[in-house]
Structures are given as structure tokens and as C-alpha cells.
Amino acid sequence: MQSSLSLSLSSSSSSITPKPNHTFDFSPCLTKPLNLNLRFCGLRREALSLSTTHPRVKLPCRRFPSCISAALSTNGSSPKTFDYDLLVIGAGVGGHGAALHAVEKGLKTAIIEGDVMGGTCVNRGCVPSKALLAVSGRMRELQNEQHLKSFGIQVGAANYDRQGVADHANNLASKIRGNLTNSLKALGVDILTGFGTILGPQKVQFGKDNIVTAKDIIIATGSVPFVPKGIEVDGKTVITSDHALKLETVPDWIAIVGSGYIGLEFSDVYTALGSEVTFIEALDQLMPGFDPEISKLAQRVLINPRKIDYHTGVFATKITPARDGKPVTIELTDAKTKKPKDTLEVDTALIATGRAPYTQGLGLENINVVTQRGFVPVDERMRVVDANGKLVPNLYCIGDANGKMMLAHAASAQGISVVEQVSGKDHILNHLSIPAACFTHPEISMVGLTEPQAREKAEKEGFEVSVAKTSFKANSKALAENEAEGLAKLIYRPDNGEILGVHIFGLHAADLIHEASNAIAMGTSLQDLKFTVHAHPTLSEVIDELYKAAKVNAHVSSPVKEPVAV
């Protein structure tokens, strides 16, 4: 499950600034605190904001600067021998990915799990939510008589068994959880059970009195649902995504607080199963973190025709669970004037206002690390930074706990990047190449900058921005599926063919986005992409047409800039 793009009950959010590339000069790092940008980001808008005040990271460097391995902290003393080369605290997707890559690199590895294998994604997020969305997709197909009639198909009334749907989600999570556990055991990774607490440099306690040491440690403790003040969660009628994924009930009327990824996906599930939905969004428009043009089309397709209404520009300042025969009550306050605006009475309220880092009790005070809004401060290489702005030796933090990009696959990519570093090869992850997807019907996907972000960046750096678009209505495969409602959008630099962002709304958008993501990661220009070949008839031709529609200046040979590290 991806995190929401907006904290609908919070009146403020910090912006996050990716750093343009440059060669780092580490020579001062032993004599004065590092000047690091410690602001954090959510999924898209914040993660990809557009400051140009930071130096560029020169990626070809293959060796650590000498000061990286120097002792920059005097918090306690490090053990002279270690139980493990690498210890990972947290066995979610990020920790699992790091552990597998560490074994590939020949490192003796252990992973500490205080809850269940797979973390949020497998047990309470990405995996079970996709099981529910698979059901909602089938239900929509069977309920759309006009769509089926266009194929010459006739079916009876579609229905579902709620417990059977819930069991499908639970069984899928159990299966994936078992696969993760078996893969770690098969590769010789030690799985240590218990909550991990850092006692000092390279030393961790797990369980009651078990102490283990490691040359390098990765924090990968993930996140939990964020519940703003004034909301009383009872797990039955006022719920978070953790509760919703169990599908214990399908209410007649559910209010969803927040219209980001989490809220949109659950609206797709609940409306397919027969619920009426009311969105409550703090900002002035729904889906505020998506590219505006994509949001406008998605609202026309995903919101307006369905049993969904919405209130924008309001906070849900107080939510009281149903009790004593009374429904759930939601008090709405105007986001600008802060005056009471309305009161709603619904059967259930789902709080989909994003996620908060799970970092309490880690023992960070033992190494002089102070969190910022709960996030562990890190630099571009995921190295933890202490309260004095100095790097904590041999300690890294990945995934939701550092807040750079709260996506499961981003956590895994960060973990792999860290393992490369502790194996002796410098590596910086290009977060602008990491895609995101919302698995509604149809799907939404994106990578890189939105059009407003790109134009803001262009104005600051002095280059032009162009936009190319293509419709799914021109795609033979989409027409054959009678699923031609969709749009693909390319944002690029016409002077050198650099892809700045790609946004897709349509059939299998979540699968299509990776071609653009990989192009950004590899620094491939549109001049080269125009010559790639796509099978016909396939949906991939939507991307092919997008590349070919781009108008790059003739006789341009300037290379695409190096990736930007956030």
C-alpha cells in the first residue's frame, strides 16, 4: 500500500528538496558538522520538490571518501569483533531486500523482526490491498452490463461473499510471508525474533536480554497509520487501513478522510462492493499530489460516475465512533477560517491520512540521534546523522523510517544501495527514477516530476519544458479490451531529450510506467528511445507513441544530466 499524498487533517506539511548532482567535498567533515538537508518527503509532491541550492552528486565515483569510514561520533565504544557483517532491524520489504543483497555480496547477515515477517507491505498494506482490489476489479466487470454486452457476453447478477473476499486477502498475505521467511532461511540469513534496540555503536539488543553486534546496521522499521488528534479509532466503526484490510464489514456509507493513494484505492474497493463513499480532503481539490491533468481525468472516471461525494477544503477535527445506537459523527472545520462548517453522520470512517514512521524505542538517544517528526535523519547515502549534524559510523536507515519516499520498493532499493556501500562500492540511489502507482480501476502511475514541478524547476535553472500526450483511444489493444479511457503524459526537455516525468492513467498503467522509470534511471534520452521497438498490438505502444510524439531539437548531442539524488 502506498502512503497518502496529503495529510488531510493536518494544516501544514513540510516540503522536501532533492539535491541536484555535484561532486561532494568531504574534506571538512571531520572538523565541522555536515550541512545536510534534513527535510523529509512523502510520495510525490514533497519527494520531488525543486530546490537547486544543493550540490550535485557525481555518481561515477566508486570508492568512499576517506572520511566516511572515520569515527565521526564519540558515543560509546565499538566492539572489536562482530557477530555479523550486517544486521538489519526490521523484516519488511526494505529489510528483506537488503538482507538478500547482503548475502549475494558475501556478508554474514542477520535480520531482527519484532512483529511478523514482511512488515506493513505484506501483512497490512500492498499485498492484501491488491487482493481486495483484484476482487473489486472483477466485480466491476461483472456489474457493467453494457461493457459485457459489447463483447456479446451475458451473465447473471454478480454477488460476493464478504468472508471469502477477506480470506483471499489474508491467505495471500500468509503465502507471501512464508515465501519471504523461506527465502531468508534458504540463504542462511539468521532471523532474530524480538524488538531491536540500539545500545551503542554497532551493538543491538533484541528480545529481553539478547545482545548482538554487527559491523554495519540498517534501521528498516517502517511505519504505522497516521491518526491526527481529535480522532478516536475503535477498530470497528472508526478504522485505519490496518483494520480495513481485514474487511470485517462492508458498510452502507463510509467516509474516507484523505484522497491520496490509500483513500482512492479503498474507495475503489468499497464502491465495487456496494458502499457509498464520502471523501474528506483538507486541500481545495481531490488527489492533490498527482499531476493536475491526470487528477482531473481520474476524478471524471473514478469519482464522478460512482456513488462518491466529497468535501474539500475541510479538516475532520473530531471523529467519534458509533456507540449506543448512534452513528459515527464527524465534525468538519473550514481549513482556511478554522470555523466549524458541518457535521456528518456515517456508518464507518476510514482514516487514510498517510503514515507515520515507527521509530520509537529504537534507542536512538544512545547514539545521540534526534528524530524529526519521528523520521530518522539521513544523508543521500542513507547514513544516519546525529544531533550535531555528524554521521553516525556504520549506521544506516532505509524506507518509511527515513521518510525520503514512503514506498515499499523504494525501501528495498535504498537497502540495496546501502549494501553496495558497505561492500566497498559507493552508490547513490536516484529517487526521481522510482515509480509509484495507484491500483484503482483504471490504474494511475507516475515517475519523476509533475508538470508544475518541472516548470518551476525549469524557471529556476533556465531551460524549456515541453509536454507530449497520447490517448489510450488510439491504442489497438485498449480498444480490443473496450478499455480505451486513459491518457499518458510525457514531460521533457526539448533541448537535450531528458525525461523529467511521465504520468499515466489507464489500463495497466502500473505496469507501463516501468519503461519510463528505467529510462530515467539509465539516463536514456528521447533521441534514443524513439528507435525502440514495441510489439503490436500491445499497451506498451502507448509509451512508444509518447516517445515518438516528443519534439526534441534537431542536431542535439548534449547528454542527459546525471540523476538527481534526493
Image: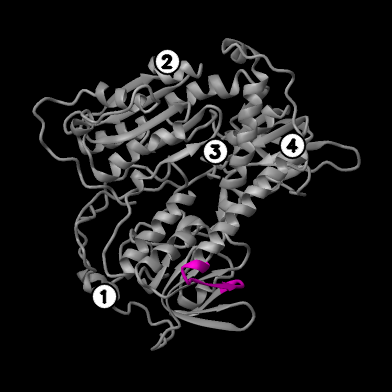
* Mark 4 residue element: strand
Residue pushed farthest right? 324
* Mark 2 residue element: helix
Residue designated by label 1: 30
* Mark 3 residue element: helix
Please report contact status of discs 3 and 1: CB closer than 8 Å, yes or no.
no
User: N-terminal of the two: label 3 or label 1?
Assistant: 1
Gap in Å between the C-alphas at discs 2 and 3?
25 Å
- Expressed as whole percent of the image width and height from the top left, the position of residue 284 reads 54, 29
User: N-terminal of the two: label 4 or label 2?
Assistant: 4
| The label number, if any, that marks residue 261 in the structure image | 3
Amino acid at circle 4: Ile
Q: Nearer the viewer, residue 80 or 199?
A: 80
| The label number, if any, that marks residue 330 in the structure image | 4
Please report contact status of discs 4 and 3: CB closer than 8 Å, yes or no.
no
**Left or right for 296, reference 355:** left
Amino acid at circle 1: Leu
Range of residues picked out in magenta: 185-196
Q: Nearer the viewer, residue 397 or 271?
A: 271
- Expressed as whole percent of the image width and height from the top left, the position of residue 103 reads 40, 68
Residue pushed farthest left? 555
Is any atom of residue 557 visible in this view? yes
Q: Residue at point 46% right, 54% down?
A: 403
Residue 186 in the magenta stretch? The answer is: yes
Residue designated by label 2: 473
Residue 208 in the magenta stretch? The answer is: no
